[in-house]
Image (tube, helix red, strand yellow):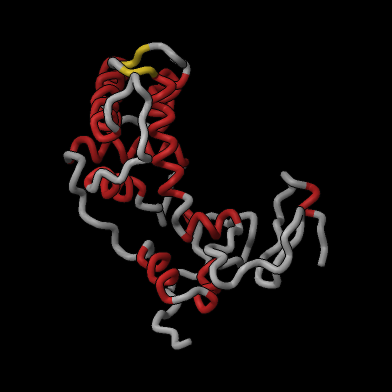
Amino acid sequence: MSRSFRRPPTVGLTPGGEQGRFPGYDVLGQVPTWDDATAAVVLSRLTAPPPIRFFTPAEQATMTALFDRLLDQRGEPRIPIVEMVDARLAEAETDGWHYADMPEDGEAFQRSAAGLDADAVEAFGGDFAQLAEDDQAAVLNAVLHRGTDDWHGMPAKHVWSLWTRYACTAFYSHPFAWNEIGFGGPAYPRGYKHPGVDAREPWEVRDVSDRDPIVAERTD
């Protein structure tokens, strides 16, 4: 099969450029094992993100700060979460459902952006995006701790679910996040030869984290 894709110069990058649990691992090394359609989809996520179409500039700033706090994105390279979420909302590509006591996802995001700014102004005297990271975290913790209580006309826990669902879907669709967690990307058409707990494929990298002794102590 002829290959029409080149491996981009982003070898082994992780969000924030931090040394991950899988040092030296680069999911893009698997590009030759994917078919052209799969490679095109994955590599397109490394190109410049699409322009914002759904959020207003103020909403974009608030949502960018929100996603950075939820995902602890503190440095470059950042995964362009707000652009990816914006593209879904602009095309009405939702999860296909929403809580009965919540508005449609697009409206819920817009109302929650306004709610975050209102809370930030009340607590710290500035819009959410303008606050220091610790102050942003305090605003978010207040939302989280409301649980089932009303928050700006919506149940707080359902707003939290909305934020985290969209944030995690975008984050873990990106090759930088795959490098961080040692994920091998699409299994088609390559497949896996060594399924099972603590089993690795020849191209996988050993987890060096001491947070998981079973994995960390494994040897080949």
The outermost residue toward the top is 149
Task: Using the image as rendered, state which of residue 164 and residue 115 is in the foreground.
Answer: 164
Relative to 136, is 54 above or below?
A: below
Task: Using the image as rendered, state which of residue 7 and residue 62 is in the foreground.
Answer: 7
Task: Using the image as rendered, state which of residue 31 and residue 51 is in the foreground.
Answer: 31
Image quadrant holding the C terminus, namely bottom right
Q: Is residue 104 left or right of residue 194?
A: left
Q: Is residue 164 left or right of residue 180?
A: left
Relative to 128, is 201 above or below?
A: below
Kindly identify the residue that appears in the image at 41 percent across and 57 percent down.
77
Kindly identify the residue that appears in the image at 36 percent across and 34 percent down.
97
The outermost residue toward the bottom is 2
Q: Quadrant of residue 166?
A: top left
The answer to whether one can see residue 189 in this image is yes
Kindly identify the residue that appears in the image at 28 percent across and 25 percent down.
103
- Residue 209 point in image, percent of width and height: 70, 51
How many numbered discs sit on the rendered protein? 0
Relative to 38, is 211 above or below?
A: above
Q: Quadrant of residue 94?
A: top left
